[in-house]
Image (cartoon, rainbow, N blue to C red):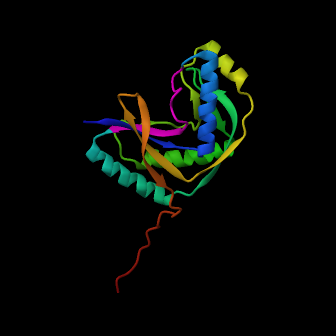
Amino acid sequence: MQKTYSLVIHPSDEILGLVKSMKEQLAAEVGWFNSKNSVGHITICEFKTTEKGLENIKTQIKKICSTLSLVNVHLNEFGSFPNGAFFIAPDNDSKKSLKRIMKQFHISLLLPDMLKSDNPHLTIARRLKPENLVKANQMFTIIDLNFVCDSVVLREFDEKVKQFFVIDTFEFGNNPQPKLIQGTLF
């Protein structure tokens, strides 16, 4: 049986706590909204696979992570999408660095029907009504956060509670990919 998984970047515990608090403040103002109970994250991709397939995917993720180096991330503005998403955005340098990491997984993971995210952001709320999006923009205006991205997190979707839960973390290895060198045997 296939299950749904997502590969994400988690900011520091301190930032996760702040995001949770912001979600609670927004809910007190506008009521329940999509992703209210979701732990803050930056999505890399989402996919479906079996338990057997998951072991192969974990091996691929470990291999990709072994070549990645940590990135300092600066989150410095709020933004929104036309679909009602309200989020915290990284600055331009951080966005470029995060996109490089995300793209490495997008091109290296051999997954059919993978849903890819190519715009790094830390979601506060999804599918807000226009008037609630206005309220969110009025409530939250200034943000200045930093964290070190040195790992990715694999999460599994629990159909009963309709939330993703962390099942594994993969640290970056800071080992550049070896270059193939033609040699001679004799």
Q: Measured from the top left, where is residue 73 in percent x and y?
A: 64, 47
Up/down of 135 relative to 60, above or below = above
Q: Measured from the top left, where is residue 11 in percent x and y?
A: 58, 44
Up/down of 92 relative to 67, above or below = above
Which segment is the magenta one? Answer: 33-48
Residue under the image location 56 percent in, 53 percent down:
150
Residue under the image location 71 percent in, 23 percent down:
139
Depth check, front residue: 100 or 131: 131
Q: Measured from the top left, where is residue 123 in percent x and y?
A: 57, 31
Depth check, front residue: 109 or 17: 17
Left or right: 54, with 30 as reference point: left
Quadrant holding the N terminus: top left
Residue under the image location 53 percent in, 62 percent down:
174
Q: Residue at the far bottom: name it.
A: 186
Q: Which quadrant of the view contains residue 115?
A: top left
Q: Does the magenta stretch include residue 55?
A: no
Residue under the image location 55 percent in, 48 percent down:
100
